[in-house]
Image: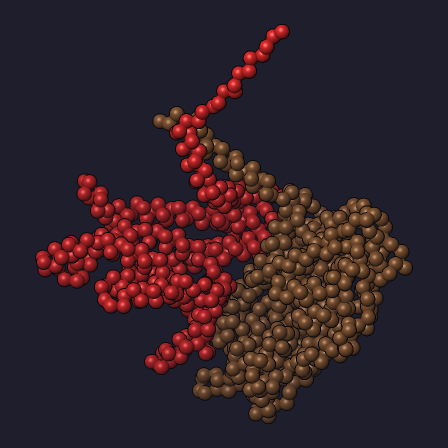
Amino acid sequence: MSDSPLSRRSFIKAVPMVGTILLAACAAPPAPTPTAQPKPAAPAPTTAPAPAPTTAPAAAPTTAPAKPTTAPAAAPTTVPAAAKPASGTVATIRVNYRIGDKPEVFEKAWPKFMQDNPDIKIVGEPISFGAYDEYFAKLASMMAADNLGDVVWVSAGSGPFMSQVFKGFFRPLDDLIAATNYDLNVFYAGAMEGLKYEGKLYALPSDFHPGNQLMVYNKKMFDAAGVKYPTDDWTFDQFNDIAAKLTKRTGDKVDVFGYAPNLQAPSYEILVRANGGSSISADAKKSAVKDDPAKTAFLWLFDAMYNHKFATRKQDQPKGGDELFFAEQAAIVTSGTGIVFNGPPRIGGKFQMGGVRTPVGKGGKHGGMIHIGGTAIYAKTKFPEQAFKVNAMLTSAENALTRALEYGGYIPRKDLFESPVVREKGGQPWQVVLDASADPNLKPYFTPYNFRTSEMQSVIDQTTDGWWTGNKTFDAGLDELDTALNVVLAKPR
Amino acid sequence: MTTMALTPAKRTKMTRGRRQAIAGYLWIMPWLIGFLGFGLIPTVTAFGLSLTKYDIITTPIFIGIDNYLYAVQTDPLFWRSLGVTLYYVGASVPLGIIGSLALALLLNMKKPGTATYRTFFFLPNLTPVVAMAILFTWILNPQFGPLNYLLGLVGIPSIPWLGSTQWAIPSLLIMALWSGLGGSRMVIFLAGLQSVPSELHEAAEVDGAGRWHRFRHVTLPLISPTMFFNMVLAIIGTLRVFEVSYLTTLGGPNYATWFYMLHLYQAAFRDFDMGYASALAVILFIITLVLTYIQLQLSNRWVYYEGEARNN
């Protein structure tokens, strides 16, 4: 037995204590107290004086960049200079954003902005978007540690943004917008809707695309089959005829599919909306997949696979239809807008690609869908005016053009989408994307009442696979989808 | 006038034993801190969080065992994911153990070029799982994949692989076996095989035992501890299967590859339901513990420890 005064027992007692002290020392301050009500935090107290008079010099130049472009008209995007946080001091505004691969584009306008606004220092904190979840998990951790940036990139609809708004982690921007006469009319209305909660705006729109409503087609196949290219007003019946004509078979084996659909929840919603409805009820608390608009949409896709047999099933395209399209084994494909630019190099001159919107449905219009990201302001920022000024710069006409041309991210500004420089960036399919973006009927993807968007999408994707793998009859699959969706929607907030 | 006598401060002399104890503890301190910070404390915390409703960003609310009750009574995906995982474990572990042992037996033959073969067989194990997933998504593509092409040459019709509920798990098994057969499990078997005394084989051969009988009655009993070790690790590792499904099928199609860990991950990092995810983690911990205990109990019947026999 050791007579050492430092016994094993005392050492084992001491180590956790030391470890705990070390961990505590490394830990960030405690998380903010939860808010039981959907009561966004009021602007944090700031020592800054009231915003400076609007006669203050504009923060950033609104003229077009030096590049010989016909840049968007200089809309009144700049915010009058906010007053300094305290005499002689500089407000440090931390910006959390998802763009990890080209931060230099996102940050390009910052040096000039800081030169024009010496009272503001921007510190960029790019966070890897990873496989989708990484960014949001990191943000949540930062919220828990009360370490969130002042300006934060968020995703409406797919990420947990609305839930975080509900819990009071972001502040509404309405007072800052009113105080600075910031003109929101430069943005598309649908994009703004995606960033609102209970009528208040919680982020300025910073990323936008009209999702999977674009269909691209192989012009060579249309020409060979003697089929005219579809026009914007085509219907689902016309689609069926065209897709059937483009399908090529050897016996029972399909060599070329007329259509490769996208088999994911947001794409279904486009079809449902074309029929004038939605997959969930108006109060976002119950499934509506058994209602006529949704049922018609799903049945159309089901028939396309199993009755008309011109559409690919899950087993034909487990990772999406793009590869089949590039390999000339599918004539029409529903893909994201990315195919407009990444498609031609993959096609390699084998054929020309045309674009058209999803057909007009029973609702008499296209099924609209937009994916929207924005830049929000942390509820506990010490410098809300300065943060808003940075936010306005991030979504300004100049920054929008830079990002669109050098990165491929599109801020939903009307002037950007109407800019000849942007319009000339792509061919005919790109024009379809731009025109679709201007559709006043566009709506963002819905958010359930309990904010469980991700869970809901997963349930829709997995359950509908029962149809697309041929394991479920239409009625059985619809019952299963309805039940599964209601289980998720019935969960608490 | 009085003078103050200056007495020298008494030096505390550290005993040799104490010095050695401090040195020893300091040497193991990095591991201990790591174990506490990244092992024990998070594990205990997870158990505590499993009794709460917790979304990371707000303070946990104590709800007792509600998360556990929800898992076993209400959540339809709990049992489904457990079933999918056990099916995968049931197929993957025996195939993996037998395959690795077969490879190790081949590579244990004293033939020219064996060292090169050992390297080649180990290489897939070094392939990052993301690269492997992308590679196999291509190989298993039902339309353009080389595997279906080769099967077509011998008259086997196209298999839908990852796009089918029936073939999705076998597809992931192919990936796992490609990556795992020649990995560390094979190396451990190889080490076990090389520790089998050659004189026992020679004696058996003299007694007229053929290859199969030598393997069955000499090799197998002597490597049974190695096999037991590999089996315990394989079951624990396979219960945690996650990456391949996340990267290739996202649990689909129609929940065919919705593994338990994927369900846990979904609850934690997509639904931000950390309390429930912690409960799922605790349940998995208990399942792993029970399975390992059962294996330990069963090992008395088939694992042969040479040293024990000698002592007895």
Q: Is residue B307 visible?
A: yes
Tell which of B107 and A260 is nearer to you: B107
- Quarter holding the C terminus of chain B? top left
Q: Residue A19 at what x, y percent from top left?
A: 52, 38
Res A400 → quadrant: bottom right
Q: Is residue A345 above or below residue A146?
A: below
Res A428 → quadrant: bottom right
Q: Is residue A216 above or below residue B267?
A: below
Residue in the image at 56% along x and 41% along y: A23
Residue in the image at 25% along x and 61% along y: B108
Tell which of A402 and A285 is nearer to you: A402
Q: Is residue B242 above or below residue B25?
A: below
Q: Residue furthest top?
A: B1
Q: Residue A302 at what x, y percent from top left?
A: 55, 75
Report the side of A259 relative to A277 (left or right).
left
Residue in the image at 28% along x and 48% along y: B299
Q: Residue B39 at what x, y percent from top left?
A: 47, 45
- Quarter holding the N terminus of chain B? top right
Q: What colour denotes chain A? A: brown
Residue in the image at 50% along x and 46% along y: B38
Q: Residue B207 at what x, y percent from top left?
A: 9, 57
Report the side of A378 relative to B78 (left or right).
right
Q: Is residue A249 above or below residue A415?
A: below
Tell which of A479 and B285 is nearer to you: B285
Q: What colour denotes chain B? A: red
Q: Is residue A294 visible?
A: no
